[in-house]
Image (spheres, grey):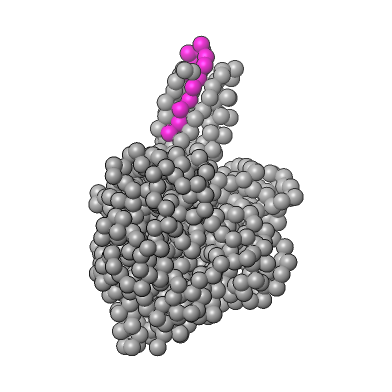
Amino acid sequence: MSLFATPLTSAGGIAQFERDQSKRVLWESLLCGSIYAAFQRSSSAFGPTTAVTFVRSSAGPDISISYKQLFEGITRTANFLGDMGGRGCGVAYMLPASIETHFLLWGAESAGYAVPLNPFLLPTEIVELVKSAGCKLFVVPKTDDPEIARRTEAVRQGVPGIRVIAIGQGPLPPSAIEYEHEVVRYSGSEATHFDAARSSLDTVAYFHTGGTTGTPKLVAHASKNQLAAAAGAAAMLHLGPGQRLTNGMPLFHVGGTVASSLAPFLAGAQIVVMSGLGFRNPDMISGIWRIVERCKVTALAAVPTAMGALLNTAVDADISSIQWGLTGAASCPQSVTERFQQVTGACLHEVLGMTETGGVTAVDPVGDASTAGSVGFRLPHTRLRVRKLLSDGALGADCDADEIGVLFVEGAHVSSGYLDPAQNEGVFIEGGLNTGDLAYFGENGKLFVAGRSKDLIIRSGHNIDPGMIENACVAHPAVSLAAAVGQPDAYAGELPVVFVSLKPGQKADVPELIAYARERIAERPAWPKSIYVVDSIPMTPVGKIYKPALRAEAARRALTDQIAQIAPGSSFQIHVASAGKRGLHVDVELSTTDEAARIAVETFLKAHTFSWSLMKPS
């Protein structure tokens, strides 16, 4: 019997799945084991079936391995890591996506614990994460990239006793251990240098949060957390042999590792790894439809921004293999959902994932029509609640249907907390997770995320969901991307403004864009005060819009205009930086002998809620 054989398309279907005694036994058996045991199980069940296809370029050729080869690579790598770092060792890595990175990730989780790192973090942040996680090994790519070299050297100098391992093609860093040369000496069939029978409660990874509001936090993952999230996703997506999913996300992110890798691996599906850079590789965007045809992709998965770019690419191949699409990591504009159906003839389903819930929280299930804007239902054997936010910031009773509250998550997929226990306060409470996200349940029981609380625009007491503004703007035929943020205002606190980028070859008049958006936004306080057309919108490495940079830029633009009016004729420079979860810090260098102008600028700055300093030019 397969855990994932029956589509779970309703709340009732999930409840029936949970009551099925035979499925419960299989579920508990899976969750009580280790990550290594899960891969051993898949190797036994799906041995010769293709597990991973690595797409080097849109023209091919591709590299594929079976489930048997995947398990052997994981076993061999776990033995190597256990020998190099000791049993239970911490293994930090900073690698592009590849078959070898999968060996490394799951091998590290088998031998000890993995600490996947975003190579775009600052060297000081990477050093701090590696040190705080107590890593013995640091794995990097062989490359002549000076930024990778700088981060590698920073870790070597900043973490006493760390051993550096290099993997892939390219020059070997100084004093590094060569993975390919050493790993072949170890067994791929039995655990000789690590404990194969680990507890499901053992920590197998520390994933860092996005790092958009200061130093990233490390979230602990036990085997049970990841397996509950991955098995839940596999059940909701009805995964199994014959399914082939694109994976264009990095393997330092839970979306790329758990939702788009471990979930298919548990069910015997195949992942199609979209080059080392994923959908950040322009060749993967321009050649997507040829890749779909060649690899017979059945599920096209990408974050909303990447999905939008894919759908703007002219179809130049047979894409009839596509059965459904999957998106997540950020809210998906309705225009992208509609465009997906127009291009592929299939439904686009959304998943809600969080680092703190093992990577998956809710899924709009495959097997039924998707619901635009919804992230679907809870995973089996988990609980989602939408709770009232009380005046003191605490969470209260459950909200009614269609009533917006704070999303609260319970289940085996919820992490035990952050590596630093002091960071758990107010987040990991009452045996569950206070996500801080605003959400509501529709009449059919599906969950809708109304907005991230940190992204809300607060105008004179009105809580404005930026999503409604972004959806209105991106519906314009010339607009490719839209990001709404709050711009500081002395009277209202914040005013909504929008940054938009246009589709190639398109032009748009700003007054016309503003009028177009206002016609489609029912709430007058949410009407954008300004729209800024920019060449590109800043993105994180996983394809999320990087709003802290946009908030800072919106503040800089507004303050520049206002200070020019307050202190005409004065020379000044403004520097704006993120400060805390929602805050900004503004430095103003004002060059003037007019004391009245200086006092006027100081009075103006005091009227705002951001922190600031007024200085003379250095």
- For this rendering, which residue is in front, 227 or 166? 166
| Nearest the eye: 140 or 117 | 140
Q: Is the N terminus in the top left, top right, bottom left or bottom right quadrant? A: bottom left
Image location (x, y in percent) of residue 129: 34, 47
Question: How many numbered badges does the structure rendering display?
Answer: 0
Residue 101 vertical placement versus 383 (above, below) = above
- Which residue sits at x=55%, y=55%? 277
Residue at the image point whose x is 29% and y is 74% from the top: 33
> Which residue corresponds to the image point at 48% horizontal and 33% vertical from the top-left?
576
Q: Is residue 478 above or below residue 126?
A: below
Q: Position of residue 353 (x, y in %)?
A: 43, 63
**Residue 233 visible, this angle:** no
Instruction: Out of 284 and 226, give the one closest to the viewer.
Output: 284
Residue drawn 58% across and 30% down?
561
Q: Going by the image, does 228 lie left or right of 516?
A: left
Residue 468: within the magenta? Answer: no
Residue 207 on image: x %, y %: 37, 56
Picture layout, residue 198 above or below residue 313: below
Q: Is residue 92 visible?
A: yes
Q: Whole-percent x and y of residue 50? A: 51, 75
Q: Which residue range is magenta in the image?
A: 585-598
Q: Magenta stretch: residue 590 in it?
A: yes
Q: Residue furthest top?
A: 593
- In this rendered view, identify the residue nearer to me: 580 or 296: 296
| Apparent side of residue 391 relative to residue 504 in the rendered image (left or right) | left
Quadrant in the picture for residue 325:
bottom right
